[in-house]
Amino acid sequence: MKISASLVKQLRDKTGAGMMDCKKALTDTAGDIEQAIDWLREKGISKAAKKADRIAAEGLCNVLVKGNKAVLLELNSETDFVAKNKEFLALLDTLANSILDSGATNTEDALKVDVDGRDVERLLIDATAKIGEKFSLRNVSSHTISDNEVFGAYKHMGGRIVTLVVLEDGNPDLAKDIAMHVAAINPLYLDRSQISQEVIDHETHILTEEALNEGKPANIVEKMVVGRLNKYLKEICLLNQPFVKNPDLTVEKFMNENNSKVKSFLRLEVGVGIEKRVEDFAAEVASVVNN
């Protein structure tokens, strides 16, 4: 039986399920809308679709290294409570291993990765239906190193923050020290060469206005701004930061003493960039009472 686009749309409007799921449901039920609705409910798909507009801003990040390959990802849930249960943690590990082994390099590709006969997107929908919270995957990235490079990986608070660094001519212990530093201090750039002129101009403007508002004479404002800008840039660049395990040395000097070099770093923290819904409990209660 041929399933029309209008019939698929009608089922989608009723259930909120995806187009392909609706088409399959209608195909399996010979185009019967009511049976198709039941089919979706039985599969847990309709239930999961209703949760699609919820905000998943909690969860955990993961970093996994296998030989010369590594993957980072963030798996979000609606509550930190769910992110602590065994099923969530198992899913987090399954995703990291499956995505790393697949060679997927970004979130879009990762969602298509097969996991025991289901792609990751379907796996997340099924998990949403089973556990009762929306799950979403983001910030997937994969990395490969050469023979003279080494990974350093670190998880903080079980994955609330994860980091990955690449060192040239280093060793795993040294790399992990730098990964821990990145987790703790949160540098934004490796060094000043990575900072765009736009960022420098913006910060210069802010510092200039700040100095002028402090009532500083105009003839010394420029020198003050240069000094403050240099201080700020050192604070946000990894190589210029005091090394967390020995503040007497910058990270760059520490690396030089160990005949190694930081090539790159990445840091993921749960929920960064997700706009969380602000809950107004009083308003919620009032709306229930008044309706």
Image (cartoon, rainbow, N blue to C red):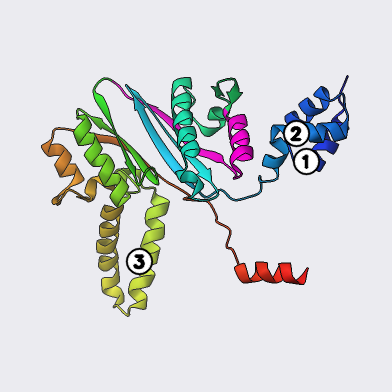
The quarter of the rendered structure image containing the C terminus is bottom right
Q: Residues within 10 Å of mark 2 (few under 14, many from 20)?
A: many
Identify the residue at horizontal 44%, vertical 31% (top origin): 93
Question: Height in image: 162 above or below 277?
Answer: above
The quarter of the rendered structure image containing the N terminus is top right
Residue holding disc 3:
207
Helix, strand or loop status at disc 3: helix
Question: Foreground: 144 or 172?
Answer: 172
Real-space Cα separation, disc 1 to disc 2, in angstroms = 8 Å
Q: Position of residue 272 (x, y in %)?
A: 46, 50
Q: Residues within 10 Å of mark 1 (few under 14, many from 20)?
A: many
- Mark 1 or mark 2, earlier in chain: 1
| Amino acid, disc 3 | Leu
Residue holding disc 2:
40
Disc 2 or disc 3, which is closer to the eye?
Answer: 2
- Mark 1 or mark 3, earlier in chain: 1
Real-space Cα separation, disc 2 to disc 3, in angstroms = 58 Å
| Amino acid, disc 1 | Thr
Q: Position of residue 39 (x, y in %)?
A: 77, 31
Identify the residue at horizontal 62%, vertical 71% (top origin): 282
Q: Residue 134 magenta-drawn?
A: yes
Question: Horizontally, is 123 left or right of 13 in the view?
Answer: left
Q: Using the rendered view, name the quadrant where residue 45 is placed.
A: top right
Q: Position of residue 225 (x, y in %)?
A: 29, 65
Identify the residue at horizontal 36%, vertical 71% (top origin): 210
Determine whether label 1 and label 2 are within 8 Å by CB. Answer: yes
Residue holding disc 1:
15
Q: Residue 286 magenta-drawn?
A: no
